[in-house]
Image (spheres, rainbow, N blue to C red):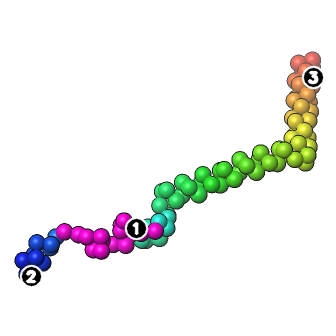
Amino acid sequence: MASQDASSEGTETATDLPSSTAPNAPETGYTADGVPTFDSVREKIENRYGTSLGSVELASETPEGRSVEEQYEARQQAAADRLEQIRRSMHEG
């Protein structure tokens, strides 16, 4: 038996590995020190970005959303017209 123990010495099995590197350990998104992994941070950002795009798309499809867009475009046009008026007055003076 002693020779069998000596031959297995230095080799690691799945039970010898720390739980964070075990093959079937559940992925928590954090390291053993409590630091978020790159993959978990990327996934959170992608989820938030997708939610944001969906919210914008839904908002633009509602009557209120279209009204806000129309008001914004009207303000932009009024600002451009006023700027043009100011420029003309500066060249005349």
Is 21 in the magenta?
Answer: yes
Is residue 75 in sight in this rendering? no
Q: Position of residue 58 (x, y in %)?
A: 80, 48
Task: Left or right? Give the position of 31 relative to 67.
Answer: left
Residue picked out by circle 2: 1
Task: Left or right? Give the position of 76 relative to 55.
Answer: right
Image: magenta residue range: 11-26
Numbered mark located on residue 80 in the image: none
Q: What's the distance in space between the residues labelled 3 and 1, CA to CA?
A: 75 Å
Q: Nearer the viewer, residue 14 or 38?
A: 14
Other-residue count near label 2 (Cα within 10 Å), few / some / many at <14 / 14–19 / ≥20? few
Q: What's the distance in space between the residues labelled 2 and 3, CA to CA?
A: 102 Å
Main SS class of the magenta portion in the image: loop
In this view, which residue lies farthest toward the left?
3
Quarter location, residue 78? top right
Three-letter amino acid code of the residue under disc 3: Ser
Q: Is residue 59 above or below residue 11?
A: above
Task: Left or right? Give the position of 29 relative to 66.
Answer: left
Callout 2–callout 1 Cβ contact below 8 Å = no
Q: Earlier in the sequence, mark 2 or mark 3?
A: 2
Q: Position of residue 30 (x, y in %)?
A: 48, 67
Residue picked out by circle 3: 89
Eye-nearest disc, 3 or 1: 1
Three-letter amino acid code of the residue under disc 1: Asn
Q: Is residue 73 above or below residue 58?
A: above
Other-residue count near label 1 (Cα within 10 Å), few / some / many at <14 / 14–19 / ≥20? few
Q: Earlier in the sequence, mark 2 or mark 1?
A: 2
Q: Nearer the viewer, residue 75 or 19?
A: 19
Q: Secondary structure at mark 1?
A: loop
Q: Secondary structure at mark 3?
A: helix
Residue picked out by circle 1: 24
User: Which residue is painted at 46% across and 68% down in the image?
Assistant: 26
